[in-house]
Image: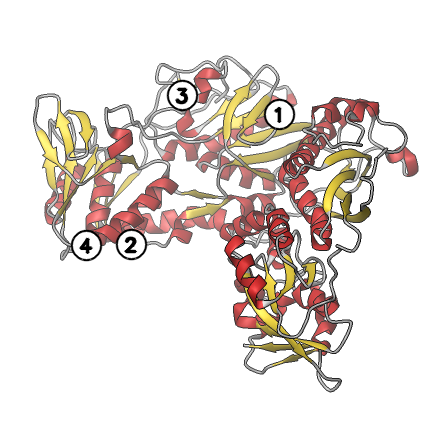
Amino acid sequence: MSERDLVLVGGGHAHALLIRKLAMKPLADVRVTLVSESRLTPYSGMLPGLVAGHYQPDDVHIDLNRLCRWAGVRFVQGRVSGLDPDRKQLDIEHQPPLSYDKVSFDTGSTPNLALPGARQFAFGVKPVSHFHEQWQRLLADAGAGAERHWGVIGAGAGGVELVLAMAHRLGPNHSVRFHLVYSGEQILSGYPKAVVRAAEQALDDYDIERHPRFRVSSVTRAGLLAVDGNALTLDKTILCTQASAPDWPAHSGLETANNGFIAVNRSLQSTSHPDVFATGDVAEMVFDPRPKAGVYAVRQAPFLYDNLQRAFAGEPLKPVDLQRNFLSLLSLGGQKAVGNKGRFVVHGDWVWRWKNRIDRAFMDKLQSPGEPMAMGDDRPNKMHCAGCGSKLGPALLQETLPQLPRADRPGLNPALSQAEDASLWQPTPGRLQVQSLDGFRAFSDDLYRLGQVSVHHALSDLYAMGADPVSAQVWVNLAFNHPRLQQRDFARLMAGVGRALHDQNVGLAGGHSTEGRETHLAIVANGELEPGKAWKKTGAQPGDVLVLTKPLGTGVILAADMAAQAPAEAMDAAWESMLTSNREAFEALKTIEPHAVTDVTGFGLIGHLLEMLVEGDLRATLNAAAVPALTGAMKLLERGWQSSLAPQLEPYRLNCDIEASVDDTMTRLMLDPQTSGGLLVALSEPDWSDFKRQQPDSIKIGHFQVGSASENPVHIID
């Protein structure tokens, strides 16, 4: 059982290697969480190769979610915007704070946009994700018309590699002139002369114009102005100068170096707060400052692991011992490179192949680490009661519940702290009460967003009935853990529940809590509607169109994610879909007259469609080619992934006439059980046109017609 929280902020090189190490040798009684704004983090050493076209994006990115799944590390997606080191809490944008016992930062740096005009007329090479988006736009612009001039400011290793890579990517027959701008006398200050000569020759070979002693004073729409009054006309400007620190460390109470980065001692520990560690670009080793280079972050990783282990054990920390003399390999545009260690220099295409092998070996450790690690025995080290003895403690509830956002609904007890043994609810006179119960086992450690999804999933049943949700009750079963960690989890989970209910004007009426082997969450949703106004599953009419409001695929994506095999783009698509409420579709349907409505959840599209056809002699024709799929879902199905429930849905095929031309993968997608799926609606053609205007993402996937006893109720065509 874990007793303490280690939170890693940022997926830089050191943290990626640390997570791999933690999978092999976990810290005793420590729960580890990674917080990252993105699921993908780039390896900076391969960026020039990506720009030059030697690599694809997948080659140079580490999938942090998959790495964490493999390692047994929790993953929370969010942008850290601040830190309260006294309360030991992280501020995450649009989320509740995340508590820690010890925290480590490896968030990198930001582009230095202090030059006048830089924010408006230039962009930096960091963060790499933003640069790559800008580079794609530049590529699209490069082939259009007249000659263009692109400039890179900065002639260190990064600037030289970047401008050579860009020139190589465009090839000899392009309309772009490249410029390398720097304030010094020569490029690659501090490198051996042989390295400088090799790089200068490459710049000449690509016809890249050099501008030494050009001290930029400002960036304008027309280009660059120098302090001596000279000007350089440019259409695009890329900054590859010394990066700057993010803003939040200086405002958090942490001691920072003069340049704004987190000041750390010889043990990578904050010089002001011993429970805070930092590594990579965001850290400044004040005892021995080093350049902001990925090689140092990689070499800091084993020291970071050792010192975190020692810090949790209460042992003295070890000083970091980093070599100053390391192997440096610089790409020269094409598949050539120059390398040096000290004064020893090598140059040629074989050096690039050497660099490529080193880079790919590094990435292979983090991209394809193998089967998910078998976690140690997680059984609690003491007996836990069942029955009512399994409830969560009152202090935990009293600390969390009053802080939740709550919708003020008439007739509902406004204060959870004053709750009675049962919830009182004054129904609206003349309206019917509607109630539904839904829940699931937790599929993610991102508990705030999990709480939101659970609400959307549960309220969808009411929306499918045409009912306005009024109140909800929640049952939470938290996984066994130390009470302090349980309180943190409960707070984040309920904050997500409270936020989603509040956003849909639904009151939280109460609930129940227990603890067990795994986290589960269920919601009782209560709603109201006018008598005779309930929407039914049945009621579709011949000539109606069949409409789906969300893509399919959450089941297979979440199944693959459990085995650390769901790619980042698939997970992002699944979360975006699950976090989208059906409320807007419900509001649009209220303006028209749907003939039949249901939501697509555990029985998959085909299963829920069959429920719409149980009455009468109606038949549905389903156009498989029109059915939308979430990004990555089809590829995962083709690779053999499926939800554990999917085999039990296979008998639905017996009620379908499936054309031979229909891809079986598409049929399996239509049998995929959905979490927080969309609405499935039968509409007349005129109402469909109106609904489409209000809900442009909805898709017409079929139609209804008169059936016969000799036919199956569902006909699937390609």
The correct choice, above or below, for 337 with respect to 664 in the image is: above
User: Element under label 2?
Assistant: loop
Residue denoted by label 2? 53
Q: Which mark is residue 144?
A: 4
- Note whether residue 264 is visible: no
Whether residues under marks 3 and 4 lie with C-beta atoms below 8 angstroms apart, the answer is: no
If you read the primary sequence from the N terminus, does the residue marked by circle 4 or circle 1 appear first?
Answer: 1
Where's residue 99, x and y in %?
63, 25
Amino acid type, residue under disc 1 in the picture: Tyr
Amino acid type, residue under disc 3 in the picture: Phe
Q: Residues within 10 Å of mark 1 (few under 14, many from 20)?
A: many
- Identity of the residue drawn at 24% across and 42% down: 161
Residue denoted by label 3? 261
Amino acid type, residue under disc 2 in the picture: Gly
Residue denoted by label 1? 100
Q: What separation in Å lies between label 3 and label 1 (alpha carbons)?
A: 21 Å
- Identity of the residue drawn at 72% across and 84% down: 708
Residue 527 falls in which quadrant of the image? Answer: top right
User: Element under label 3?
Assistant: loop
Whether residues under marks 3 and 1 lie with C-beta atoms below 8 angstroms apart, the answer is: no
Q: What separation in Å lies between label 3 and label 4 (alpha carbons)?
A: 41 Å
Which of the two discs, 4 and 1, sits closer to the camera?
4
Q: Residues within 10 Å of mark 4 (few under 14, many from 20)?
A: few
User: Element under label 1?
Assistant: loop
In this rendering, position of residue 135 left or right of residue 205: right
